[in-house]
Image (cartoon, helix red, strand yellow):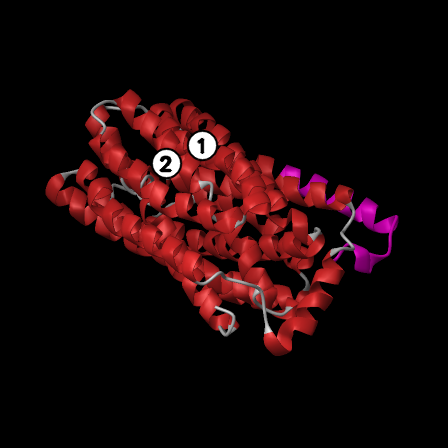
């Protein structure tokens, strides 16, 4: 692939991202079907999501380390084909315990994708275009989150939610095998030819990392924002069905429309990040997220929910490429996959822990109180993080922090 232009790298990984999430995006929209099938409480329903999310987060750590040590090819393959095999097993599970177990396996396998993909993408483009490239890559994930609920619910309406997992696992597995063949035949390398000098310059800049204290605060903040947002999104279908009387199919369509926001918000966010700096953009998004979640719980009508979710979607899908661009820029190249693994691990693990807690809160106090509490706590955490970053900024030149 030495003659490939950056667009071809990005296009390959857009498709890889799409197939990676076709199965992982099924859990939440099919949750009403799973809940009814097993007669679950909100807390037990939250555990279904958390079983996958916690395992997905744990899988990021060894995957990031392995990608740095042995290269991304095998790790990426497990992140797609391995997810397909585990997803088929989810569909074949006959009890609640087996369902939880196979969701854990699917999560561990899925941890292989993101820490390996982001450094390859960032290496394929000039540094000033890094955010845009990572934003375009997220189109694949947003597309699968748009398509998967619609297809999954349609299949579930015909043959049940188990059939959705089994049927969708087949094309995912086929693409995973095809990707392995492509990566084996033509190793995906960083820029070549006229761009080699620029690549060396970018690599040299990456060897002057941002202070660990700043990176740590950033990781805590972005993981917290992602975790709190993810836990709320997990209950959106149940919120619409139980509070606003929507059908399960309508809730799935609503969720698909929400994820469609990523088709334009992620590339836009990446471009804005390239222009104004990823940390600056992130702080604006983080400050806005908590109040939006509070407004979500206070919504009197599903139309208001739709507008609030549009705002949450913008903060969510812009934050993703912004966070990845910041971390890729802030750490040494040899440690990028490892640090990205920590980033994905932290957000997913926190979300996995928070989701059943939020579910229990909803069981006891209702959706509105649960969402209000999540939004208030998130707002407080972000405020503290901003203060800490401000203090760190005073002890070093601004340009060393606002990457």
For marks 2 and 1, give the CA distance.
8 Å
Residue at the front extreme of this rendering: 185
Looking at the image, is 84 positioned above or below residue 126? above
Look at the image and tell me whether residue 290 can be seen: no
Callout 2 crowding tier (Cα within 10 Å): few <14, some 14–19, many ≥20 = many
Q: Position of residue 381 (x, y in %)?
A: 65, 38
**Quick one: 266 or 184, which is closer to the camera?**
184
Residue at the bottom extreme of this rendering: 194
Which residue is located at x 47 percent, y 43 percent?
A: 112
Q: Are dots 2 and 1 in contact, CB under 8 Å?
A: yes
Residue range highlighted in magenta: 380-403
Residue denoted by label 2: 106
Residue at the left extreme of this rendering: 158
Determine which of the numbered discs, if any, sits on residue 333 in the image. Answer: none
SS class, disc 1: helix
- Magenta run includes residue 399: yes
Relative to residue 136, is residue 153 drawn left or right?
left
Relative to residue 226, is residue 199 drawn left or right?
right
Look at the image and tell me whether residue 330 can be seen: yes
**Quick one: 227 or 346, which is closer to the camera?**
346
The quadrant in which the C terminus is found is bottom right
Q: Position of residue 327 (x, y in %)?
A: 65, 52
Residue at the right extreme of this rendering: 395
- Magenta run includes residue 79: no
Residue denoted by label 1: 55
């Amino acid at each position: 692939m030495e003659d490939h232009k950056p667009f071809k790298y990005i296009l390959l990984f857009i498709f890889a991202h799409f197939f990676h999430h076709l199965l992982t995006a099924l859990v939440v929209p099919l949750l009403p079907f799973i809940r009814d099938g097993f007669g679950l409480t909100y807390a037990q329903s939250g555990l279904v999501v958390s079983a996958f999310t916690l395992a997905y987060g744990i899988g990021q750590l060894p995957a990031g380390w392995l990608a740095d040590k042995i290269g991304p090819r095998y790790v990426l393959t497990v992140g797609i084909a391995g997810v397909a095999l585990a997803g088929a097993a989810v569909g074949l599970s006959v009890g609640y315990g087996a369902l939880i177990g196979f969701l854990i396996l699917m999560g561990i396998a899925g941890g292989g994708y993101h820490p390996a993909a982001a450094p390859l993408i960032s290496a394929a483009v000039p540094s000033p275009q890094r955010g845009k490239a990572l934003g375009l890559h997220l189109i694949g994930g947003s597309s699968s989150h748009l398509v998967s609920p619609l297809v999954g619910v349609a299949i579930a309406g015909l043959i049940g939610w188990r059939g959705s997992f089994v049927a969708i696992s087949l094309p995912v597995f086929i693409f995973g095998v095809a990707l392995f063949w492509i990566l084996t035949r033509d190793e995906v390398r960083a820029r070549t030819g006229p761009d080699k000098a620029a690549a060396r310059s970018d690599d040299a800049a990456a060897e002057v990392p941002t202070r660990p204290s700043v990176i740590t605060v950033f990781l805590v903040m972005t993981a917290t924002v992602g975790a709190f947002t993810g836990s709320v999104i997990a209950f959106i279908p149940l919120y619409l069905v139980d509070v606003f009387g929507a059908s399960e199919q309508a809730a799935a369509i609503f969720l698909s429309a929400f994820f469609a926001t990523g088709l334009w918000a992620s590339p836009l966010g990446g471009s804005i990040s390239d222009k104004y700096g990823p940390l600056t953009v992130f702080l604006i998004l983080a400050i806005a997220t908590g109040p939006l979640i509070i407004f979500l719980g206070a919504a009197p009508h599903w139309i208001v929910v739709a507008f609030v979710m549009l705002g949450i979607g913008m903060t969510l899908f812009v934050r993703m490429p912004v966070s990845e661009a910041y971390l890729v820029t802030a750490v040494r190249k040899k440690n990028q996959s490892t640090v990205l693994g920590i980033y994905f691990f932290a957000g997913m693990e926190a979300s996995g822990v928070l989701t059943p807690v939020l579910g229990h809160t909803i069981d006891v106090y209702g959706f509105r109180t649960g969402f209000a509490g999540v939004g208030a706590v998130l707002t407080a955490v972000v405020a503290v993080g901003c203060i800490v970053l401000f203090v760190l900024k005073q002890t070093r030149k601004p340009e060393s922090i606002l990457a």
